[in-house]
């Protein structure tokens, strides 16, 4: 600011006369730069006012979020649930398939064993010695054992398969309910999105205009506080020594510093950025 004044009122009056037109041009350029500087680097008081305006926009955005309620979270949770259940159904289905393959093999084996058994059975009557007869009977017994073992396994498979199949049916039915629920929630959210689309776009655009004027540090501080449950409430006014966000008192020395607006302070109780009442006259 001092430098600007020096340039505008040069020490040598002669020079001023000589460069009258030039000076006009110069001050116009200076004005332009001052203006540009104002946009790019607002002083801290201006920055705080900007943050206050930003909070008002974010409050409106938060209200829209509230209208949408927990629909986005619900949709997320339902989608996840459905995917998990579908994965289990797929695993169970492949289990059933494996069991079925095993069962078919056992049936096939048993058929072969029975054929061999009946051949031995025929040979039994043409045995030429007792030993041969006993050997044939022993072979038949081996096949009877094998067949019985396979039949037991088939029963086991069938009972396991009926349990898994019932699980699949139950899970499929449940998933159908979830899917219906998901569709309903999606539809509701879509309706709300359409309803608020224009308003949100407008607010986002307004927000962008303000946010580009802030330096990175201030912006990230603001966004950090504005995220989550503090959305639309990242700044608070200091009124009669209290934070308007949490109603806790601000120490008198801090209150003075906040009024001076040379540094950004956050509330020691709630973490909101504190702005002196005088900076936001129409709050
Ligand atoms: Zn507070």
Image (tube, helix red, strand yellow):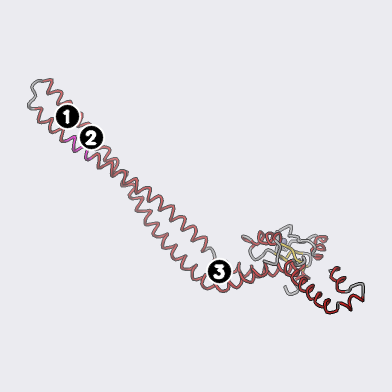
Name the residue tied to disc 3: 67
Which mark is in front, 1 or 2? 1
Apparent side of residue 155 relative to residue 236 in the rendered image (left or right): left
Residue 148, numbered label:
2
Tally of marks = 3
Q: Say if disc 1 is inside 8 Å of ligand 1.
A: no
Q: Ligand 1: which quarter?
A: bottom right
Give the percent coordinates (x, y) of residue 104. 25, 42
Label 2 and label 3: CA atoms lie apart by 67 Å
Secondary structure at badge 2 equals helix
Viewer-proximal residue among 43 and 91: 43
Magenta residues, as a range?
Answer: 107-114
Q: Is residue 9 above or below residue 247?
A: below
Which residue is located at x 37 percent, y 55 percent?
A: 172
Residue appearing at x 30%, y 43% in the figure:
99
Q: Quadrant of the N terminus?
A: bottom right
Residue annotated with mark 1: 140
Tell me the crowding category of disc 1: few under 14, some 14 to 19, or many 20 or more residues within 10 angstroms, Cα based. Answer: many
Q: Is residue 39 magenta?
A: no
- Give percent across and percent down for residue 118: 13, 33
As displayed, is residue 123 above or below residue 220? above
Instruction: Look at the numbered disc 1 and give the secondary structure of its residue.
Output: helix
Q: Position of residue 231 (x, y in %)?
A: 63, 63
In terms of sequence position, does the residue under pointer 1 or pointer 2 come before the other? 1
| First in sequence: mark 1 vs mark 3 | 3
Residue drawn at x 38%, y 48% is 91
193 vs 63, nearest the viewer: 193
Residue 18, by quadrant, is bottom right
Residue 129 x, y percent position in the rendering: 9, 20
């Amino acid at each position: 600011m001092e430098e600007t004044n020096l340039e505008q009122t040069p020490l040598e009056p002669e020079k001023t006369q000589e460069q009258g037109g030039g000076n006009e041009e110069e001050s116009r350029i200076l004005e332009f730069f001052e203006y540009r500087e104002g946009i790019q680097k607002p002083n801290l008081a201006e920055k705080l006012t900007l943050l206050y305006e930003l909070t008002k926009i974010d409050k409106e955005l938060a209200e829209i979020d509230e209208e949408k309620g927990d629909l986005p979270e619900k949709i997320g949770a339902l989608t996840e649930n459905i995917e998990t259940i579908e994965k289990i159904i797929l695993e169970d289905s492949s289990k059933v398939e494996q069991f079925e393959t095993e069962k078919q093999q056992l049936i096939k084996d048993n058929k072969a064993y029975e054929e061999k058994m009946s051949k031995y059975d025929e040979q039994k009557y043409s045995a030429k010695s007792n030993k041969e007869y006993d050997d044939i009977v022993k072979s038949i017994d081996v096949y009877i054992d094998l067949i019985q073992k396979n039949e037991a396994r088939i029963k086991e498979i069938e009972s396991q398969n009926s349990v898994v199949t019932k699980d699949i049916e139950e899970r499929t039915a449940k998933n159908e309910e979830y899917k219906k629920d998901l569709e309903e929630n999606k539809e509701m959210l879509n309706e709300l999105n359409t309803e608020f689309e224009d308003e949100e776009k407008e607010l986002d655009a307004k927000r962008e205009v303000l946010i580009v004027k802030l330096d990175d540090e201030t912006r990230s501080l603001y966004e950090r506080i504005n995220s989550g449950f503090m959305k639309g409430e990242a700044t608070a006014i200091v009124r009669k020594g209290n934070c308007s966000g949490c109603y806790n008192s601000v120490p008198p020395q801090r209150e003075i510093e906040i009024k001076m607006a040379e540094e950004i302070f956050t509330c020691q109780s709630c973490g909101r950025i504190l702005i002196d009442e005088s900076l936001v006259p129409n709050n």
